[in-house]
Image (spheres, rainbow, N blue to C red):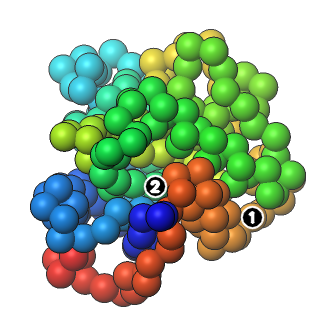
Amino acid sequence: MPRDIQIRRLGRVAYGDALELQKRLVEQRKTGEIPDQLLLLEHPPVITLGVKTRNDRSHVLAAPETLDHEGVEVFVSGRGGDVTYHGPGQLVGYPILDLRPDRCDVHRYVRDLEEVLIRAVAGFGIVSHRLPGLTGTWVGHEKLAAIGVRIARWVTSHGFALNVSTNLAHFGLIVPCGIIDKGVTSLDKLSGGPIAMNNVEDAVVEAFSLVFGRRLAAAVPAEAPVQNC
């Protein structure tokens, strides 16, 4: 039987607040207090460092003064991967899933997230794909969506970031994911016009439920206070 998943559409959330929310939900998921979760949100402008680069900021190209002027924070996260950027117009998804008993495979989990994103953007006429040896989804040699995950006792956190109407110039502040010879793109850039964020959220939810075999449970209202989650 499909397992339930609860969708939380949270709007714009500060990165630190989203980290704390994930930590609480992960613990609740480990104890079985809540079903699987999918958090959908946007962040204010922030550069995040993965585990392997938390003590190495060589891939942050901008000086601290430039970041301050642009209103961009720098935050050390607990996910895998290198440095990345989050900001308004980017759909961030944080799945809190218990992969037991039948999906205990990290590589499969990442490939499944890629499949979700490939299917979701196909509904807007965008053909994206994987690149051998790299994570995320791509159009040509430009990254459309980034993936960085954390798995503890087979419960997942962190997740993916899909560029919808993101300010792509902010990626010039960093070496995205530490990859020097690839670019970045967005749904708006590829489609030639604006795509409503709520429509992208709907497409991701549908693709996620199909790829992971989950049944949609009652959603948590977007206005629900974070501290009550």
User: Badge 1 is on which residue?
Assistant: 195
Is residue 119 at least partly visible in the picture?
yes
Q: Position of residue 148 (x, y in %)?
A: 40, 35
- Compared to 12, does 142 lie above or below? above
Please tell me which residue is depicted at 63% across the width and 64% down the height of the picture. Answer: 206
Q: Which residue is mark 2?
A: 93
Looking at the rendered structure, the secondary structure element under dot 1 is loop
Q: Residue at x 72, y 22 (%)?
A: 141
Does the residue at mark 1 contact the one at mark 2 (Cβ under 8 Å)? Answer: no
Structural crowding at the residue carrying mark 1, measured as other residues with C-alpha within 10 Å and reported as few (<14), some (14–19) or many (≥20): some
Whether residue 199 sits left or right of residue 83 in the image: it is right
The reply to whether residue 15 is in sight is no
Question: Is 162 positioned to the left or the right of 203 in the image?
Answer: left
Residue 20 x, y percent position in the rendering:
18, 59
The residue depicted at 26 percent of the width and 41 percent of the height is 154
Amino acid type assigned to the residue bearing label 2 in the image: Gly
Q: Residue furthest front?
A: 1
Q: Quadrant of residue 49?
A: top left
Q: Is residue 198 above or below residue 68?
A: below
Q: Of 147 and 102, which appears nearest the observer?
A: 102
Judge from the rendering whether residue 91 lies leftward or rightward of residue 188; answer left or right: left
Marks counted in the figure total 2
Q: Quadrant of the C terminus?
A: bottom left
Task: Give whichever of 113, 73 is nearer the camera.
Answer: 113
Inter-mark Cα distance, 1 to 2: 17 Å
| Three-letter amino acid code of the residue under disc 1 | Ile
